[in-house]
Image (cartoon, rainbow, N blue to C red):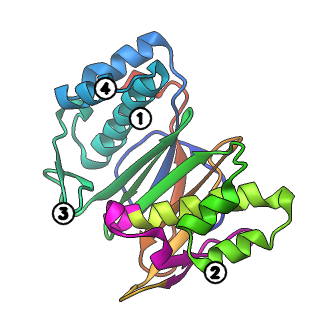
Amino acid sequence: MSGGAFATAEPGPLAGPCVWSIDLALTETALAGCAAILSAEERARAARFLRPADRTRHVASHAALRLILGRACGHAPKNLAFTARPGGKPALADAAGLDFNLSHSGERALVALSPAGRIGVDVEVLRPMPDLGRVARTYFAPDEAAALAALPDSERLFAFMACWTRKEAFVKALGAGLAMPLSRFSVSLPPAPAALLRQEGKPGAWTLGHLEPGAGTVGAVAVEGAGIAVALRALPSDWPRDLA
């Protein structure tokens, strides 16, 4: 899987691994509807953000997550209860077999779901990074930093962000959080297809996919298992209407 188009669809029962793309640019009325289905803890977490834009994106992305999970499980989005797995990765309290992950950057969010096996997702808005070489040497594996340095200047920013999201998606799928340094494994860089190249210990089989969910964004999904097909879906622009 590499890139691919996100087909607009209504969320529903889950047939296999899927990544949903969500537009977070909403009206005030739509945002109020999003906030209404969140738990008190989720609203409190949103209130701790200093920037209004960060607060609204947190509210919108978590409401979208509830909508997608609710439709997959056959429950009302407002009634979902969450718990945390070892390492801190969120899980549904009453759907042990369903793994999911959320990422958002700017006005774009991605929600990944898998009915069998771990899954992780990451998205980033492309933005100028004058120090990306230093960041790569600090956080990437040596082979990744060398591959990035060998690219033409015009390709380096996109490759850096693609590498970063591939690594973040894999770490998030593992549920390891900050306990796993990014230098302990290697992923491919564009123009090569997304792939896990090296991991210390017992890596198992994983599928990495490159994503471009919207203009000026790049992302990645990591799914446990070899050769896993991942469906790409996008919520309609008026998705908050389905929250009630």
Measure the C-alpha gap from mark 3 to mark 4.
Answer: 24 Å
- The one of 39 and 137 positioned closer to us in this rendering: 137
Measure the C-alpha gap from mark 1 to mark 3.
Answer: 23 Å
At label 2, counting other C-alpha atoms closer than 10 Å, the crowd grade (few under 14, some 14-19, many 20 or more) is some
Number of residue marks: 4
- Closer to us: mark 1 or mark 4? 4
Q: Quadrant of residue 215?
A: top right
Please, what is the three-letter code of the amino acid marked with disc 2? Answer: Asp
Using the image, tell me which numbered label, if any, was put on residue 135.
Answer: none
Residue for point 41% across, 35% down: 61
Earlier in the chain: of badge 2 and badge 1, it is 1
Earlier in the chain: of badge 4 and badge 2, it is 4
Residues at circles 3 and 4 in contact by the CB criterion of under 8 Å: no
Please, what is the three-letter code of the amino acid marked with disc 1? Answer: Ser
Q: Give residue 16's position: percent from left, percent from top.
A: 40, 63
Residue for point 72% across, 75% down: 147
Residue hosting label 1:
61
Q: Is residue 94 visible?
A: yes
Residue hosting label 4:
48
At label 1, counting other C-alpha atoms closer than 10 Å, the crowd grade (few under 14, some 14-19, many 20 or more) is many
Q: Secondary structure at mark 1?
A: helix
